[in-house]
Amino acid sequence: MNADALPRPLRRIAGRRTRHPGVLLAAAAICAVVFLPVVTLFLIALSGSGEDWPHLARNVLPGAARNTATVILLVSAGTALLGVATAWATVAYEFPLRRVLSWALALPLAVPPYLAAYAFAEFFLFSGPPQTLLRALFGFASARDYWFPDIRTTGGVALVMILVLYPYVYLTSRIAFLMQGRDIADVARTLGARPARVFFGVLLPVSRPAIVAGVSLVLMETVNDIGASEYLGVPTITTAVFTTWINRSSLEGAAQLAMVMFVLVFALLMAEQWARRRLRFHDRRSTRMRARAARVQLTGPAAIAVPAGLLLPVLLGFGVPLYVFADYASGRLDHLLNAALASALFNTVLTSGLAALLTVALALVLIHATRLSRSGATAALTRLAMLGYALPGTIVGLGLLFALARIDNTVDAAARAWLDVSTGLLLTGSAAAVVIACTIRFLALAESGIRSGLEKLPPSLDEVARSLGRSPAASAATVLLPLLRPAILTAAVLVFVDTAKELSATILLRPFGFNTLATLVYENASRAVVQEGSLAAIFIILTAMVPVILLSQALSRDGSAPPQDRA
């Protein structure tokens, strides 16, 4: 049937689909790469005979699942409570150091959970500062004379996670509280509601979507963790995947456990979507966010207690790791010229830089495809490609390892047959595998950052350029890209930092003798010499601090109304 015979609306749809067939193909290809690890693991799991499953189901899975569920419950409750409380305190009240604490509360986000676990284990040792001070104050002679909590427990793992991951909830909750405007709270106040009633009855329910979003990010990071739980001696499903493959040499068993882990992550995502299914709140005017309620001026003991309470999570989540590693590093400054550290630093910069470039490029392709095609299929494929961020690094790493190994073997066999040359391991024998894994994991991070910048631009900008004869690609390159440069740079920095901190996928995919800063610290911690990796740990924290400080300072410029005295 000729397209000219179709009605005009259908002719437009048909024309749009035939004019840009490449964008749909590009989105489908990116989506296929994102799901390659999951499909590979699924096939490996099905190929197993199942002989290891009775042992796993009887001896491994129950304890690992129980520990994982306990950690998830404790971390979700703890981060929600701490994140919301700190966000509300900095938004609703005026007290000394409020502006400093507003951005400092995000600093623990610069500390990866595995570094925090190493630091806490060292800090709370018998010879650590807290126990030494306790013995000095009360005259205790040995550990038998007093009780001190053990950090190497399920509760200890949860505490570490809470202290470094609560900023996810703090940042999303703070934004939500700032954007509510003052009208909704003023209405409740005019009806006689006290501040506590306004918060619990009005503002907290309205901010639930943002809080749930922050907690979901926390849970994804919790499930992804391998270093903290392994070092503190708490077996989880994530560590069980790794140990089943390495210690029992059972690839099929590891793949089956990874599929259990994938089902858990999928259930968490569905629970998050269900929790937000009816939560839709909109203000009539975006300018209302500038008319925020005046902060209440705290006086007396409250003016001291509130900033002290807000400073505590910063000192624990950021100060303790920085103190421990800085103390160790101060005695090892000669290691700055160490070849292993220099190699790890170079490898980290290389993989993080390549991952940032590739991830931003693919994110731009997806955004351009969605903007150009405007079809439901392209939009659906783009959303599917964003699910990589929800995949734990263990699943991505294990699945990619064998998928890329199969590709390497196929290419090598073809080269031997046709050219009588061995290509070797092109992907799994280099940093390429780590770069691909981090690209899959952090594609959503780059896409959301760039898209947020694009949404601030008038949609007619590139259309004007195209009306002047520019092609879609030329208009995007000459009009949109220069305007999106800040958003692109921000997305690249975020991906760079997350790749530098990534441990789970890097452990599985790095070639022999290839270390990043994260794996160098992990190797030293595995040999019970955390202090030998202290300089690498300091480099990781300092690298991650840059975007965290920039982000938190930008969010602290809220332009709130001047404080008012407490009634």
Image (cartoon, rainbow, N blue to C red):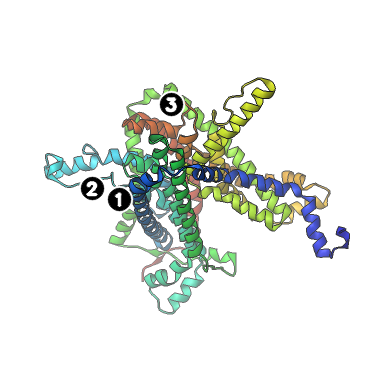
Q: Earlier in the sequence, mark 2 or mark 3?
A: 2
Task: Tell me where residue 253 appears, x and y as whole percent.
Answer: 43, 42
Residue in the foreground of this view, choosing between 142 and 298: 142
Dot 2 crowding, Cα within 10 Å, few <14, some 14–19, many 20+: few
Circle on res. 102: none
Disc 2 vs disc 3: Cβ atoms closer than 8 Å?
no
Dot 1 crowding, Cα within 10 Å, few <14, some 14–19, many 20+: some
Marks 1 and 3, how far apart at CA = 33 Å
Q: Which amino acid does label 2 sit on?
A: Pro
Q: Which of marks 1 and 2 is nearer the N terminus?
A: 2
Marks 1 and 2, how far apart at CA = 10 Å
Q: What residue type is labelled 1?
A: Gly
The quadrant in which the C terminus is found is bottom left
Dot 3 crowding, Cα within 10 Å, few <14, some 14–19, many 20+: many
Residue in the foreground of this view, choosing between 272 and 65: 65
Task: Tell me where residue 45 appears, x and y as whole percent.
Answer: 49, 44
Displayed quadrant of residue 247: top left
Q: Is residue 122 above or below residue 293?
A: above
State which mark lies toward you, 1 or 2.
1
Disc 1 vs disc 2: Cβ atoms closer than 8 Å?
yes
Residue indicated by mark 3: 341
Q: Which amino acid does label 3 sit on?
A: Leu
Residue indicated by mark 2: 149
* Residue 502 visible (yes or no): no
Residue indicated by mark 1: 155
Count of all numbered marks drawn on residues in the image: 3
Task: Tell me where residue 389 appears, x and y as whole percent.
Answer: 53, 48
